[in-house]
Amino acid sequence: MAEIINESSSKHSSKRKKHEVHLDMTPMVDLAFLLLTFFVLAASLAKPKSLELIYPSEGKNTPVNERMVTTILLGDSAHKVFYYRGMFDVDSTQLIPTDFSSHGLRHVLFALNETGLHRLNQLHDKLIAQQISQDEYDAGYKNLVNDDDAPMVVIKTMKGTKYEYVISTIDELNITGIRKRIVQKMSEEEAVRTERERK
């Protein structure tokens, strides 16, 4: 009897050995390669971009329409940005405070370029309606953004101004469709007024 029990138990143990689970790792390896490919592509798409800023040579003047010029003064803080219209005058120019919020500088620039944006939208509608060709649209676009009545923005920086603020300002100009822009250093009088207004 004992022999029969031993034989049956040995048969059961051999069956258990036959039913051991075999884990196939091929799908896991495939998944790992897919994730690796995704992260490599995502990392290459998210590379930081740089913006080269070239300051104009000192002593060279560019003729501009004074009534269409708005100057933005960037100090060493993003919370206090100033702008003024026309040419700077020590006695009469009033610095108007703003910031980089959607209700700040962007609102000012949209109001500044309201007419230009309306004309650009009309031109774009004609292109969509196939009333003009792509070449005609490109020529019309260049004429509108370079027109004497198109707004010009002068971005002025001081010693403590971060490039981040300049890039943020250029982003706002791109969003609001203002293509005529100049980057310069502040004059001594402008820097003194900016520091005084910040306090």
Image (tube, helix red, strand yellow):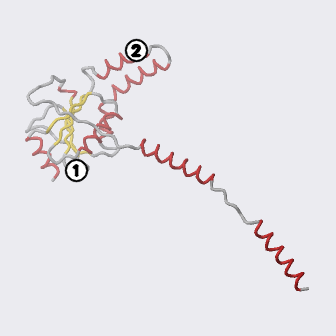
Instruction: Give the percent coordinates (x, y) of residue 161.
Output: 19, 46
In the rendered structure, the answer to whether residue 188 lies left or right of residue 78 reads left
- Which residue appears at 22% of the width and 27% of the height? 68
Q: Earlier in the sequence, mark 2 or mark 1?
A: 1
Q: Position of residue 47 (x, y in %)?
A: 38, 43
Residue, disc 1: 77
| Residue at disc 2, secondary structure | helix
Q: Nearer the viewer, residue 24 or 188?
A: 24
Residue 199, label in figure: none
87 relative position to 10: left or right: left
- Report crowding for label 2: few under 14, some 14 to 19, many 20 or more residues within 10 A (C-alpha): few
Disc on res. 135:
2
Residue closest to the eye, 17 or 59: 17
Left or right, residue 119 beside residue 68: right
Hey, which residue is sitting farthest front in the picture?
A: 3
Q: Residue at x 14, y 31 (%)?
A: 87
* Residue 182 point in image, percent of width and height: 21, 31
* Amino acid type, callout 1: Ser
Which SS class for mark 1?
loop
Q: Nearer the viewer, mark 2 or mark 1?
A: 2
**Distance from label 2 to label 1 (Cα)?**
43 Å
Q: Quadrant of residue 109?
A: top left
- Where is residue 178, by image quadrant? top left
Reply above or below: 198 against 55.
below
